[in-house]
Image (cartoon, helix red, strand yellow):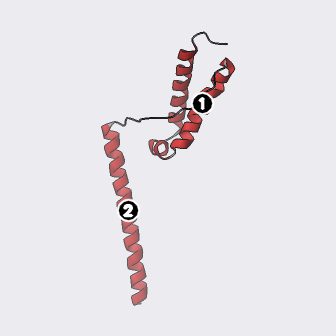
Amino acid sequence: MEVEYFEEAVAYTAQASLRDVLDKYHLAELLQQRDLIAQLLQKMPDDHTNSWGITMQTVGISDINIPMELSNAMSKQAQAERERQARVILGTAETEIAAKFA
C-alpha cells in the first residue's frame, strides 16, 4: 500500500475530486446531469485509489444546500424564462391568426 491512513486519504481524494467537478459545472448543470456528475465523482477518486488497492464502488451526491439568495435568484430566473416562453407562444399564435385573417 502507498498510504498508511487510507480512510483519510480516500476522504481527502474524494473531497478534492468533488471540488474539481463542481468547479467545472454551473449549478443548473449539476442538478440536471446528476448521473454524469456521479460517474465523474466515482472515476476521479477511483483513479487515485486503485494504486492503493482500493476500488470505489459507488459515489453520489445526496444533498446540495443552496444559499437562500442563490435560490431566490434561480427562482426569478426560471420564472422569467417561463414568461419569455409564454410570450413567444402567444406571439406565434397571434401571427398564425393574423395570417389566417389575411
3 left or right of 23? right
x%, y% of residue 22?
50, 35
Which residue is the extreme one toward the bottom? 102
Classed neighbour count for the residue bearing mark 2: other residues with Cα under 10 Å, few (<14), some (14–19), many (≥20): few
The quadrant of the picture occupied by the N terminus is top right
Look at mark 2 in the image and give the residue it sits on.
84
Decide which of tag 1 and tag 2 comes sooner along the chain: 1
x%, y% of residue 42?
58, 32
The quadrant of the picture occupied by the C terminus is bottom left
Q: Is residue 85 above or below residue 18?
A: below
Q: Is residue 55 above or below residue 34?
A: above
Q: Secondary structure at mark 2?
A: helix
Q: Is residue 86 above or below residue 58?
A: below
In this view, the residue in front, 97 or 53, is 53
Is there a contact, CB below 8 Å, between mark 1 and mark 2? no
The image quadrant that residue 80 belongs to is bottom left
Query: Residue visible at 54% across and 39% down?
Result: 37
Look at mark 1 in the image and give the residue it sits on.
57
Classed neighbour count for the residue bearing mark 1: other residues with Cα under 10 Å, few (<14), some (14–19), many (≥20): few
x%, y% of residue 85?
40, 64
Query: Residue visible at 34% across and 45% down?
Result: 73
